[in-house]
Amino acid sequence: MSELTPNLDFTSSEPLYVQLYKYIKNEIKTGNLTVMAKLPSKRKFARYLQVSENTIESAYEQLMAEGYIESKARKGYFVCAVEQYHFSSSEEPIAEEKLHIEGKYLYHFTHSGVDIRTFPFSVFRKLTNQVLAKDNGEVLLLGHPQGELELRNQIAEYLYKSRGVNCSPSQIILGSGTQYLMKNLLQLLGESIFAVENPGYHRKLVIFEKEMDNVRDIPLDKDGLILSKLKKSGANIVFVTPSHQFPCGMIMPIARRMQLLKWAKEKPGRYIIEDDYDSEFRYTGKPIPALQGLDKDEKVIYMGTFSKALLPSIRISYMVIPRPLLKIYQEDYFFYAQTVSRIDQVILIKFLQEGYWDKHIQKMRGVYRKKRDSLMAAISKYFPPCAEVIGQDSGLHILVRPNNGMTEQELIKKAADTGVKVYPVSQFGMNEGHTILLGFALMSEEELELAVRHLSDAWYSN
């Protein structure tokens, strides 16, 4: 073990597993680790370095991905044969792979995760086997450009029952994720002035696609987007997250929703884009119907996804567009091939038809409510009274203001130093500089408490 003694800097902003990966790679390049040299086991190496086994595993995984080491079943990890000319100083530098570090921390407050422990794997296996058990040639071919009709039927029925959305299956367009559908929608709406919530999820994407000259930032109050500011902006398209504003968490009351609908109907060409991204999860108060369900003038474009309630990797989102826009879409954009796997669509059809979706949603509401309660209890237990929590009434994340004098970057770095990944809100346009986003879907109740205790040590210990 003495031949591998990296000098890990626990105060560095660079994750420990990246430091270890770089160290071992350099040892191989310089020949200090020879071909077929055996690396320490993850357990022993972790104990020796006094780090988590996840740190060792992440470093080994990256080294294997790049071909520096290999894993042999029941034997361990060994250095691969690598041509030394690859390491010549005269060689042009190779573009460095940007590491994707999701899940490489001890505790991860990601806002895009789900509870993988409760995912119905057995059901999905059964349905997948049913879809692929027979020679079903249809699922191997391209389907309808808007998505399978039966899936759109199921979605229309579910949206009406759960969110009060009124639409026909022909108004529904499926796509591989909300961002993909957003790009298509922005193209469909053409030369418009777009208003976005600030702070808000859509701001960065809309500015990227349409440039700042065509985008108007609309500030928020306790009820969401401020209508007086929208009216003065000159925008004719507005993006909103009324059921759970992202990232601030407020719920737009019915009075503000009706005012927003009134704004849309006052002039031709105005539309409201309603992103109902996690409306299934509301913990206090009565459910509020979707904005689209209140719309009598076909002014609302409704967007939803299966990523939050089911699993992010399935990449099935949908939008419901008003009939005037549907006509334009089917005339000018119908040549676009459907981007969602037809096999996944057929599996999801069965999942919805056979009642598994309703059971899953009911179960997850209870699971996430308990997690939310555990997170809030841990914050109350380990954080001082000066800490503030925002947006805890619905959704799968909260905002926290530690109020300890640290900047956003200092809060993130201090958390990372203790193995906890937290998220900035500045990327969504929130410029207070001392607020952090905590998603709670991925971790267990026990992990949430441990993670909060780590944050307390990082943020409040002298």
Image: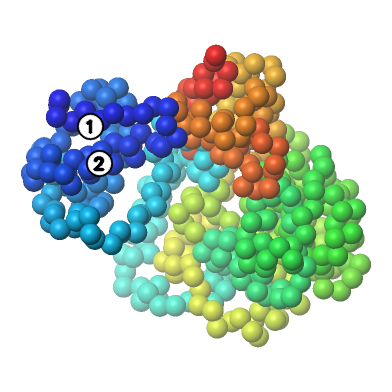
Q: Foreground residue, 447 or 62? A: 62
Q: Residues within 10 Å of mark 1 (few under 14, many from 20)?
A: some
Query: Can the viewer see residue 137 in this picture?
Result: yes
Task: Give x and y (percent) for residue 304.
Answer: 63, 57
Q: Foreground residue, 33 or 389? A: 33
Q: Foreground residue, 110 or 375? A: 110
Seen in the image, is 268 located left or right of residue 143?
A: right
Name the disc covering residue 379, or none: none
What is the basis of the colouring in this image? rainbow
First in sequence: mark 1 or mark 2? Answer: 1
Q: In which quarter of the image is residue 186?
A: bottom right
- Amino acid bearing label 2: Tyr
- Amino acid bearing label 1: Lys
Element assignment for label 2:
helix
Where does label 2 land, which residue?
60
Task: Give x and y (percent) for residue 25.
Answer: 23, 44
Q: Residue at x 34, y 40 (%)?
A: 18
Q: In which quarter of the image is the C terminus?
A: top right
Seen in the image, is 234 located left or right of residue 106?
A: right
Q: In this view, does 421 lie above or below 229?
A: above
Where does label 1 land, which residue?
42
Task: Give x and y (percent) for residue 442.
Answer: 48, 38
Q: Residues within 10 Å of mark 2 (few under 14, many from 20)?
A: many
Element assignment for label 1:
helix
Seen in the image, is 70 located left or right of residue 370?
A: left
Q: Which residue is drawn at 70% across and 81% down?
A: 328
| Distance CA(mark 1)–CA(mark 2) | 9 Å
* Number of marks in the rendered image: 2
Q: In this view, does 131 lie above or below 405?
A: below
Q: Which residue is drawn at 28% across and 40% down?
A: 21
Q: Which residue is drawn at 22% across and 55% down?
A: 89
